[in-house]
């Protein structure tokens, strides 16, 4: 696999100088065009020690407009990072659309080193490569241009490079005992590298193998690949937008397609909305459940067990009321409530899951989402804010996201609060006539009622595709607020107690 990167490619000073000037200007021009584009560029640099990864990144920082560059290098995870799911630190450092992100010691380094040092089996290594592939496919499907460079040296070339650096008083600091240890494990590194490239080199996130022995050659080679990649993607996006502009406006709507036909029973229509809890019984039940939740949450804080609660449901179904009954039972330092509305400019410039990854709390805390990532397959689907191919693939992306959370030991619970259309109208009218509640009611709330059937079918699909053993949906009959609040509290306590065992 690496034979083509062991041919001693070189570039003379004269040829380098002749190509450098034009290449730098072309890159700067493309960077200006990229600034207005709807996709980011993600460059991953990996390879053998001494092959010029850092030097190449430094060269690109020298050539390009650094105001539009993100350069990140990941070391051993900090305590803050270890308390969150593994990919949290990678998601939060993604560049926005129109920018270039360059990554050293990226998401490939930990599994590669673990495999070389025998800390994980080949099967475990393949599984971690599969998780990386899914991660990159999600970014690529969202439009990201991903180019991965494997900087390579032959075993003899690596030895020569390390010795040369050691002899230079100004450069010897670059060589460490770890570098020589890795050189002695050269064959194992190359074997792991081949396995990495075979598992994760895809059409949407390809690997480019670069011979790293000559700094002039590798700089020009990387810059040329980058130039051609951005130029090609810009042209593709222009064609795509042109095709969309010419399409019938009906095709721009996220069509509601479901296995459930209009008028047929859905998972929501099967719920018994007659379930109720008398006020007197509710008051006693509430105090009992809140007391239990307080003890469980304090124990979770001590053990470092985090929780994520997701609340979805019809407008006026009682999400806020249920959340307040949870938070009033806990120390305010141990939870955060995240209200999800229309994405900000910063959030809209990235993959839709980015804003949810960044809200992951530290160990032992509870994070409560009032609306969530399920907006992708609900409001964005029904209202046409997401194209059909976008919300359809979101089911898989969401399941993968939630699997990351569950594997980290997070207690993940998702609630859908269900009421009838008549009950919703009743609650809307009550809000209209109550001064301190009127702010909750908007024209959009009334408008959404007109598409009740479309939303119900979307919810049916959502539950069908994303209610998993690791991340189940709890469907709450919320016609009676007392019953709904008690059921939510009871579910939280049960799942938290089970996790703490």
Image (cartoon, grey):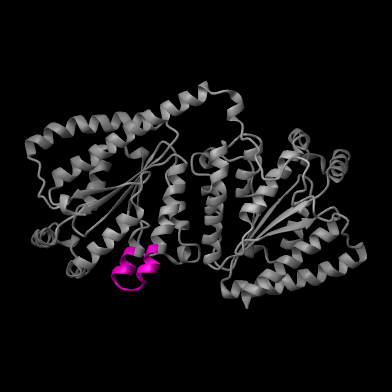
Quadrant in which the N terminus is drawn: bottom left
* Magenta span: chief secondary structure: helix
**For the point 56% across and 40% down, which residue is it?**
344
Q: Is residue 432 left or right of residue 3?
A: right
- Which of the 4 image quarters holds residue 275? bottom right
Q: Residue at x 68, y 44 (%)?
A: 458
Q: Is residue 358 visible?
A: no
Q: Nearer the viewer, residue 258 or 305?
A: 258
Q: Nearer the viewer, residue 205 or 354?
A: 205
In the image: residue 138, left or right of residue 161: right
- Residue 326 in picture, x, y percent from top left: 73, 62
Residue sitting nearer the eye, 133 or 266:
266
Span highlighted in magenta in the image: 112-126
Considering every residue shown, the one lying at the far bottom of the view is: 501
Q: Is residue 329 magenta?
A: no
Residue 136 image point, x, y percent: 42, 50
**Residue sitting at x 26%, y 42%:** 60
Quarter of the image where the C terminus is located: bottom right
The residue most toward the top is 246
């Amino acid at each position: 696999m690496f034979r083509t990167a062991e041919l001693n490619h070189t570039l003379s000073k004269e040829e380098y100088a002749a190509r450098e000037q034009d290449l730098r200007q072309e890159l700067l021009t493309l960077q200006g065009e990229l600034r207005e584009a709807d996709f980011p560029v993600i460059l991953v640099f990996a390879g053998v020690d001494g092959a010029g990864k850092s030097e190449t990144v430094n060269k690109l920082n020298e050539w390009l407009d650094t105001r539009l560059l993100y350069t990140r290098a990941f070391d051993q995870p900090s305590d803050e990072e270890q308390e969150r799911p593994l990919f949290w630190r990678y998601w939060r450092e993604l560049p926005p659309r129109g920018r270039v992100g360059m990554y050293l010691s990226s998401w490939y380094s930990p599994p590669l080193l673990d495999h070389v040092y025998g800390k994980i089996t080949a099967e475990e290594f393949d599984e971690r490569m599969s998780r990386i592939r899914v991660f990159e496919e999600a970014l690529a499907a969202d439009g990201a241009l991903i180019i991965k460079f494997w900087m390579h040296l032959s075993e003899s070339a690596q030895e020569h490079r390390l010795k040369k650096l050691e002899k230079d008083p100004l450069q010897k600091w670059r060589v460490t005992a770890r570098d020589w240890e890795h050189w002695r494990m050269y064959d194992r590194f190359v074997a792991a590298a081949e396995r990495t490239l075979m598992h994760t080199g895809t059409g949407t996130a390809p690997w480019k193998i670069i011979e790293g022995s000559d700094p002039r050659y590798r700089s020009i080679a990387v810059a040329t690949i980058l130039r051609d990649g951005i130029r090609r993607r810009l042209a593709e996006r222009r064609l795509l937008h042109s095709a969309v502009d010419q399409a019938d406006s009906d095709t721009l709507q996220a069509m509601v397609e479901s296995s459930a036909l209009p008028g047929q029973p859905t998972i929501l229509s099967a719920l018994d909305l007659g379930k109720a809890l008398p006020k007197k019984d509710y008051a006693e039940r509430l105090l009992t459940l809140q007391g239990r939740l307080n003890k469980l949450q304090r124990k979770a804080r001590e053990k470092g067990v985090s929780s994520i609660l997701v609340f979805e449901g019809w407008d006026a179904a009682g999400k806020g009321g249920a959340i307040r009954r949870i938070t009033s039972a806990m120390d305010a330092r141990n939870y955060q409530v995240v209200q999800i509305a229309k994405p900000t400019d910063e959030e809209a410039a990235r993959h839709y899951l980015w804003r949810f990854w960044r809200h992951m709390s530290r160990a032992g805390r509870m994070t409560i989402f009032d609306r969530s990532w399920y907006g992708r397959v609900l409001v964005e689907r029904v209202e046409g804010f997401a194209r059909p191919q976008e919300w359809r693939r979101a089911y898989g992306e969401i399941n993968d996201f939630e699997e990351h959370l569950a594997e980290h030991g997070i207690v993940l619970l998702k609630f859908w609060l269900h009421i009838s259309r008549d009950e919703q109208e009743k609650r809307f009218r009550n809000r209209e006539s109550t001064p301190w509640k009127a702010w909750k009611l908007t024209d959009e709330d009334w408008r959404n009622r007109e598409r009740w059937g479309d939303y119900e079918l979307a919810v049916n699909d959502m539950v069908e595709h994303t209610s998993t053993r690791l991340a189940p949906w709890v469907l709450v009959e919320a016609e009676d607020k007392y019953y709904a609040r008690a059921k939510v509290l009871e579910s939280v306590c049960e799942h938290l107690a089970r996790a703490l065992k």
